[in-house]
Image: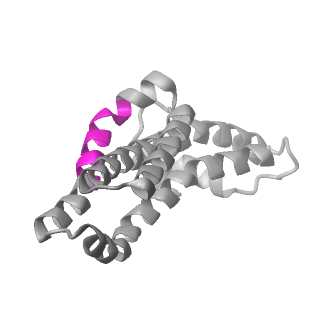
């Protein structure tokens, strides 16, 4: 089971790492881009803003993509798309190529963020079931409350269906 935890954490954390990287990298890259491509202030604004435009499109389409391909597959595809966008930025020879690549990267980051939360929510029920067995003494735990049990209990507050709880509460707990 520990291998599953490690794989789940690594798969879901890739999106967060890419998100943080991409948000921070433009502040250091923009002066060099401006000097190399002779960007006007309006072009600089577009280069920065198109990441958010791509993110808006990704936010609008992310749920559909996750439902169509599955959460884990969506995470992996968006990570590949992020890499593709980063490669396009690396080989860009024009301002328009930079703008297209920034849109691709923005889309990938937004869809990955949606898929990460959904994936963690899906697998949290697996963790909760295992922790419930352990808390009943089936695994030598002797009733000690584990972190995942606390998360499961807190995520079901106000959930009348007795289901897996709220995505928001699981996301905030992580």
Farthest right residue?
Answer: 140
* Image-based side of 128 in relation to 156, left or right: right
Which percent across, then down, holds residue 120?
Answer: 55, 44
* Image-based side of 62 in relation to 155, left or right: left
* Image-based side of 168 in relation to 132, left or right: left
Q: Overall secondary structure of the magenta stretch?
A: helix
The quarter in which the N terminus is drawn is top right
Quadrant of residue 94 within the rendered picture: bottom left
Q: Nearer the viewer, residue 128 or 108?
A: 108
Q: Nearer the viewer, residue 111 or 40?
A: 40
Magenta stretch encompasses residue 16:
no
The residue drawn where x is 42% and y is 50% is 88
Residue extent of the magenta highlight = 51-63
Farthest top residue?
Answer: 68
Which percent across, then down, holds residue 95?
Answer: 25, 57
Q: Nearer the viewer, residue 127 or 36?
A: 36
Q: Is residue 169 visible?
A: no
């Amino acid at each position: 089971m520990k291998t599953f935890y490690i794989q789940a954490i690594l798969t879901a954390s890739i999106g967060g790492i890419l998100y943080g990287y991409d948000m921070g990298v433009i502040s250091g890259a923009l002066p060099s881009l401006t000097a190399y491509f002779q960007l006007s202030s309006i072009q600089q604004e577009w280069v920065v803003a198109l990441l958010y435009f791509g993110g808006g499109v990704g936010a609008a389409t992310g749920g559909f993509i996750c439902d169509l391909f599955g959460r884990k597959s969506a995470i992996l595809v968006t990570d590949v798309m992020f890499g593709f966008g980063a490669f396009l930025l690396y080989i860009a020879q024009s301002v328009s190529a930079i703008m297209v690549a920034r849109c691709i990267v923005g889309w990938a980051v937004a869809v990955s963020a949606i898929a990460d939360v959904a994936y963690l929510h899906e697998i949290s029920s697996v963790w909760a079931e295992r922790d419930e067995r352990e808390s009943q003494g089936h695994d030598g735990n002797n009733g000690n409350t584990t972190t995942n049990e606390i998360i499961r209990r807190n995520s079901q507050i106000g959930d009348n269906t007795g289901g897996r709880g709220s995505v928001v509460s699981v996301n905030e707990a992580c």
